[in-house]
Image: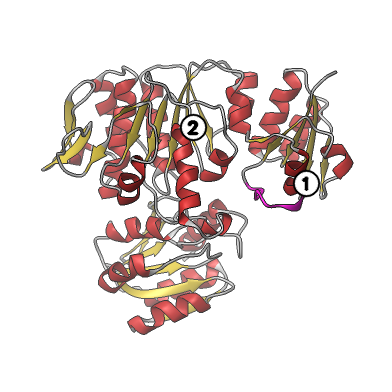
Amino acid sequence: MTKRIVILGAGESGTGAAILAKKKGFDTFVSDSSHIQDKYKEMLDKRNIPWEEGHHTEELILNADEIVKSPGIPNNAPLILKLKEKGTPIISEIEFAGRYTHAKMICITGSNGKTTTTSLIYHIFKKAGLNVGLAGNIGKSLAYQVAEENYDYYIIELSSFQLDNMYDFRANIAVLMNITPDHLDRYDYKMQNYIDAKFRIIQNQTDDDAFIFWMDDPVIQQELSKYRVHGRYYPFAEHREDGAAAYIDQDKIVFSEPIAFNMEQEELALTGTHNMYNSMAAGISANLAGIKKECIREALQDFQGVPHRLEKVCRVRGVEYINDSKATNVNSCWYALQSMKTKTILILGGKDKGNDYNEIADLVREKCSGLIYMGLHNEKLHQFFDPFGLPIADVQSMKDAVQAAYGMAKKGETVLLSPCCASFDLFKSYEDRGDQFKECVRNL
């Protein structure tokens, strides 16, 4: 009898998983409780894959042999609990796709910096002329590429949600950038649950594999001893330390292994301390893949950066506007504020995920000349930041946020959108939030 695979969620990852399942001869069905975008409907229709939207028909789902679940669906959703009760295996799209390819997997996770690092690694591999795909949280879904393309390498950005439902998938090179509190609303507000999810990236590594991580991260340091790691360690650090595969030495980034080389910090395309770490992690990954140091150096020099991540929009009447809409947690905003060279008007707020603003308190006092709270529920921001005595505006649209910032900012200052929060109270996504910011700024 043909095995039945049901895909829950028909976004990028779900549609890709459905296409791969159909191609591999499974009885395939797709169910999405909300609206499916037209482009995904067309992709499913073209391949005669049945789908439903706006609801889940339980009798068409509970008879599945295996479920591929969208990372956005919480593990405690009622339908998921029913499936678990039945003992139906529930996996992620990445886990499913990994079964059907022998490509080398370079996987990146962490609370911050993963999109930039993933994009940077992909840029270096592409520049080196390797046959490489970009997948996970960015690019096309891995399952779609495994079904339709034939790459030798995949550079994959993995969120903790994707890692939650990965069991046999193996990362040949695993990169763990950092671990700071994020998405705690999805992990019973227990930091340990979130940490465990991140460390799943190394769960099936062998002695032939590599584990790249930030040596100075207190959480990684503390947790490392708990795990049996088979992959070889290639840590990066801020200063020269025993065992560091890359570190910062005065004005240079030094790569010590497997092939030693260094480059001047000012040659790097990306600025700011956090981008040093991103560049080190990317450089080590490429170095391990045997890419020539000249090529790595050149790629780290001409990388264009990631949209919505410290993206310069324009200068209006002597004020710089920067879009960091991708900063959906507090630690991300910390990095953004730390890289500011001028007094800053900070726009923050949105859907709070259990945020602790103490982390940015000192930087806000030091760097900010005004705060704009943008969200439906700004009480927590008022409670925490109002005592700082800074000028404050309360807004519920991007247009009002940009107008308020325009009124507050003095010549020579910077307006920074770095919200610390998810975007779903007022926007479709962080991209939508960033695009609206750029449009409003350009209309000033």
Quadrant location, the N terminus: top right
Q: Tell whether 189 sits left or right of 124.
A: right
Front-lying residue, 371 or 100: 100
Front-lying residue, 157 or 315: 157
Q: How many marks?
A: 2
Name the magenta segment's main secondary structure: loop
Task: Where is residue 371? Give x, y as percent.
Answer: 40, 74
Q: Nearer the viewer, mark 2 or mark 1?
A: 1
Label for residue 156? 2
Q: Is residue 9 above or below residue 379?
A: above
Badge 1, how many Cα within 10 Å: few under 14, some, many 20+? Answer: some
Q: Quadrant of residue 18?
A: top right
Name which residue lies at 29% across and 29% down: 284
Task: Where is residue 380? Give x, y as percent.
Answer: 49, 76
Task: Where is residue 85? Give x, y as percent.
Answer: 76, 44
* Residue type, label 1: Lys
Task: Determine the secondary structure under disc 2.
Answer: strand
Name the residue beneath numbered marker 1: 82
Residue 199 lies in magenta, yes or no? no
* Residue type, label 2: Ile
Label for residue 92? none
Name which residue lies at 29% across and 33% down: 300
Name which residue lies at 53% across and 31% down: 135
Q: Quadrant of residue 229?
A: top left
Task: Check the image and name the residue furthest to the left.
Answer: 250
Task: Where is residue 47? Give x, y as percent.
Answer: 79, 24
Q: Is residue 169 above or below residue 86?
A: above
Marks 2 and 1, Cα distance to the nearest angstrom? Answer: 31 Å
Task: Determine the secondary structure under disc 1.
Answer: helix
Q: Tell whether 264 sits left or right of 187.
A: left
Badge 2, how many Cα within 10 Å: few under 14, some, many 20+? Answer: many
Q: Which residue range is magenta in the image? A: 72-79
